[in-house]
Structure formats: structure tokens, C-alpha cells
């Protein structure tokens, strides 16, 4: 198990290092000058040169990359070009909102997907099955930037049940969480259904039923536990998509998280903040996938034993 853990940890570290370099290079290749954004195109050339020198943007790209990587090793993310504040402070203000939204969306997805998937598997071929799979197709097909405004129009403008945007009020989290969690629920419900259908045909399920166990005990204690392995894998992979979708959802609902900060940094050409936002999302994605591998290995000993040979 230790060898398996160390190998996954090394892979995660290499992935994070590669993402850090790639993000830095891509951001600096994209057209746009933060100095012109801050001073305007009509600013004197001397003023622009002085500001560019003070921010270190006049240095060669490899020097800037070395300075950036050196700062990362010391957990120094630099200073915002727009607000002149440490990037760490800016992130600390925004990360809790994104974590709150992500956890709420995950809870919504599980609350929708598990009952739908189980019901569709137990009622295979029935109207319940077709309805659940129809919801799944609908949830996958509607993007966040379409579903979000629809929910705002219905539940905020017409019914007045929830706030239109922002974090004020107890119901402000409901619509963003529904928007972000619906697509994940659609994918998970299909996976729960397909894995349960495979497991319900196994011999040990028939043996459990022959012993007189109730249907709920057979499904929850035996079938669902063994069907959890593929679901955990898909859930871990889709959490990265959840973070990516948070960028759009936060902009639609004016949710003050990492996603909204990312778009603001792009508009302002605030390189340090943008690099930090993408790095946080990338690191979260890598860590979630690493945790998924470890959980999978704990649930299925064959994985870690095979890796250690």
C-alpha cells in the first residue's frame, strides 16, 4: 500500500509541476498587455515602460518563469498587478465560496443520482427507467450557461423564491448548486443504473435473496456496495469537470468564487492572479483524482496488489 501511495503521490507532483509551467507559458503567449489595461492605450510610452519595469514584465520570459517557479517552491504566488495585493490573500477570500458551492453541488448530484439510478435499475424497462434516463440525457445536454438563466427566470423572476445572484440570503446557494450539480447527477445516475444491473445478475445476489433477505437489504448492503467502484471512479473524474463548470456558474450567478476571479483576471490581464486561479483548479483536480485512486485501492485490494508487483 505504501508503494502504491508513493507512486500516486509522485505522479501528482509531476502533473502539478507540468501544469504550473504550461499555465505560465500559455498565459504569456496570449495576446494582451496588462500595462495597457491599467494605464490605457493613450498613456505615454515612458509611463508604460516604467510600470512594466516595476512589475518585472520587461524581463526575459525564462527569467520570469524561473522567478515564478521559485516563488511557488516558497508558497509565494506573487502580487496582483491590478490591486497590488498578495495573490494569496485574494485567493483566501474567494476559495471558501467555491468550496461551498462545489460541496453543495456534489450533495445535490448524489441526492438526485443515487435514488434515480437505483430506481431505474430495479424498474428496468418501466416508465421509471425511461424517465430517469430521459432526465439523464437532458441533464447532460443542457450546458450551465443555459440552465442557469432558465432557473433564474423561473425560480427568481417569476416565482421569487430565490435571489437572482450573489451570496446574500439563505437560499442564494440553491440555484447555483442545482445548476452545477444537475449535469453531474445525470452522469452518475446512468453509471449507478448500469453497474447495479450488472451486479444484480451475480450469483451472490441470488443467494442473498434465496436466504430470505429483503430487497432493500440486498440492494443497499450487497449490490450497491459492490457497484460503488465504477461510480467512485466516475465521481472522481467528474469532480474536475465540476470545478471547470464552476467558472461559468459563478459568472451566471455572480458568485464570488475562484471561477469569477479567473474571468476577472483574464479581463484585466492580471497574470499572477490568473496563474494562481488556474493552478488552484488544476491542483484540486490532481488531488481529487489521486484521492480517487487511493479510495479505489482501499475498496478493491486487487488494485494495490497488482500495482505493487
Image (cartoon, rainbow, N blue to C red):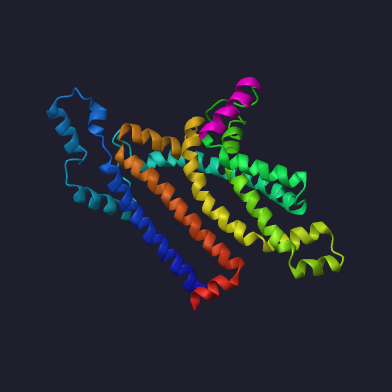
Q: Is residue 151 magenta?
A: yes
> Could you tell me what secondary structure mostly forms the magenta stretch?
helix
> Residue lying farthest top?
158
Q: Is residue 155 magenta?
A: yes
Locate residue 128 relative to residue 55 in the image: left or right.
right
Q: Is residue 121 visible?
A: yes
> Where 36 sits versus 107, above or below?
above
Q: Decide which of 52, 24 is in the foreground and name it.
A: 24
Question: Which percent across, then down, holds residue 241?
Answer: 50, 47
Locate residue 182 relative to residue 52 in the image: left or right.
right
| Residue depicted at x 56% and y 58% | 233
Question: Which percent across, then down, holds residue 215?
Answer: 82, 58
> Where 9 sits versus 286, above or below?
below
Quarter of image, res 10: bottom left
Q: Is residue 168 visible?
A: no
Locate residue 246 relative to residue 52 in the image: left or right.
right
| Residue depicted at x 79% and y 61% | 218
Locate residue 98 relative to residue 53 in the image: left or right.
right
Q: In this figure, what is the number of numbered marks?
A: 0
Quarter of image, res 219: bottom right
Q: Decide which of 23, 70 is in the foreground and name it.
A: 23
Q: What segment is highlighted magenta in the picture?
A: 145-159
Amino acid at each position: 500500500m505504501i508503494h502504491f501511495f508513493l507512486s500516486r503521490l509522485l505522479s501528482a507532483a509531476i502533473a502539478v509541476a507540468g501544469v504550473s509551467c504550461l499555465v505560465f507559458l500559455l498565459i504569456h503567449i496570449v495576446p494582451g498587455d496588462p500595462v495597457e489595461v491599467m494605464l490605457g492605450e493613450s498613456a505615454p510610452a515612458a509611463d508604460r515602460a516604467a510600470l512594466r519595469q516595476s512589475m518585472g514584465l520587461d524581463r526575459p520570459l525564462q527569467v520570469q518563469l524561473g522567478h515564478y517557479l521559485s516563488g511557488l517552491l516558497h508558497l509565494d504566488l506573487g502580487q496582483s498587478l491590478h490591486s497590488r495585493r498578495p495573490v494569496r490573500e485574494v485567493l483566501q477570500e474567494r476559495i471558501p465560496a467555491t468550496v461551498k458551492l462545489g460541496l453543495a453541488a456534489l450533495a445535490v448530484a448524489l441526492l438526485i443520482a443515487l435514488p434515480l439510478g437505483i430506481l431505474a435499475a430495479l424498474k428496468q424497462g418501466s416508465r421509471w427507467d425511461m424517465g430517469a434516463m430521459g432526465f439523464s440525457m437532458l441533464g447532460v445536454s443542457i450546458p450551465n450557461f443555459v440552465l442557469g438563466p432558465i432557473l433564474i427566470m423561473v425560480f427568481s423572476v417569476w416565482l421569487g423564491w430565490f435571489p437572482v445572484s450573489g451570496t446574500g440570503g439563505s437560499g442564494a446557494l440553491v440555484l447555483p448548486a442545482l445548476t452545477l450539480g444537475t449535469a453531474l447527477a445525470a452522469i452518475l445516475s446512468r453509471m449507478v443504473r448500469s453497474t447495479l444491473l450488472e451486479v444484480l445478475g451475480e450469483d451472490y445476489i441470488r443467494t442473498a435473496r434465496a436466504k430470505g433477505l429483503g430487497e432493500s437489504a440486498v440492494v443497499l448492503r450487497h449490490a450497491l456496495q459492490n457497484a460503488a467502484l465504477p461510480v467512485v471512479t466516475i465521481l472522481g473524474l467528474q469532480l474536475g469537470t465540476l470545478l471547470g463548470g464552476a467558472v461559468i456558474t459563478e459568472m451566471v450567478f455572480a458568485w464570488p468564487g475562484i471561477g469569477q476571479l479567473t474571468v476577472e483576471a483574464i479581463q484585466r490581464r492580471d497574470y499572477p492572479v490568473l496563474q494562481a486561479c488556474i493552478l488552484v483548479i488544476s491542483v484540486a483536480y490532481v488531488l481529487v483524482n489521486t484521492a480517487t485512486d487511493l479510495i479505489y485501492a482501499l475498496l478493491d485490494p486487487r488494485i494495490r496488489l497488482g500495482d505493487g508487483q
